[in-house]
Amino acid sequence: MERRGAKRLTSSRIGERFAELRRDRGLTQDQLAERLQVERETVSRFERGVTDPSMTKVLEICEILEVPVASLITRISANVSDYRVRIEAALQVCVPADRELLCETLERLAERLGKQANSDRETDSASAAADANASALTRVPGPRRSDRERTG
């Protein structure tokens, strides 16, 4: 069941990316559908993640939207190395001084977000421990086994 949910999430994210790219290119669903030779509803289903396009359709969509398939995949990936590709691409368009500024900013942001994530985890752990303690304090013990055997 979890695998099906993960697949739906990936389909949804691919669809969202297709929709974003389509809008960025100034295309309507009708226009994209016409170029793909499918119904507009089919494009809508792809974008909502309801239906997965075939690999052939993915390639056609990427060609129409003028994006490499790899860029589509790296935009939806949870793999850290895929983000490296995006960061390197962003650095390519910068002059050296701006690259340094971008790297420093990214490092500071990552450090800050990392501290926030650690703080959130500590808060969650402390909250869970407090809930467990409160539950243990308010728990009313039931009859002991020996008591149940005597009355049963």
Image (cartoon, helix red, strand yellow):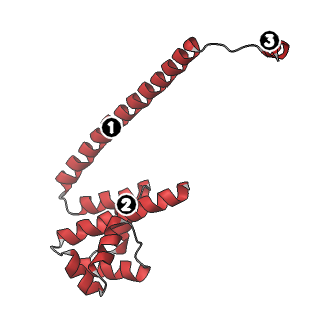
Q: CA distance from mark 3 to mark 2?
A: 59 Å
The relative height of residue 3 versus residue 31 in the rendered view (above or below) is above
Q: Picture coordinates of residue 115 (x, y %)?
A: 36, 32
**Would you call the spot at circle 1 few (<14 residues within 10 Å), some (14-19), or many (20 or more)?**
few
Q: Tell me the element at label 2.
A: helix
Image mark for residue 113: 1
Q: Quadrant of residue 118?
A: top left
Q: Nearer the viewer, mark 2 or mark 1?
A: 2
Identify the residue at image location x=36%, y=57%.
83
Q: Tell me the element at label 1.
A: helix
Q: Are marks 1 and 3 in contact (CB under 8 Å)?
A: no
Q: Quadrant of residue 52?
A: bottom left
Q: Nearer the viewer, mark 3 or mark 2?
A: 3
Q: CA distance from mark 1 to mark 3?
A: 55 Å
**Would you call the spot at circle 2 few (<14 residues within 10 Å), some (14-19), or many (20 or more)?**
some
Image mark for residue 76: 2
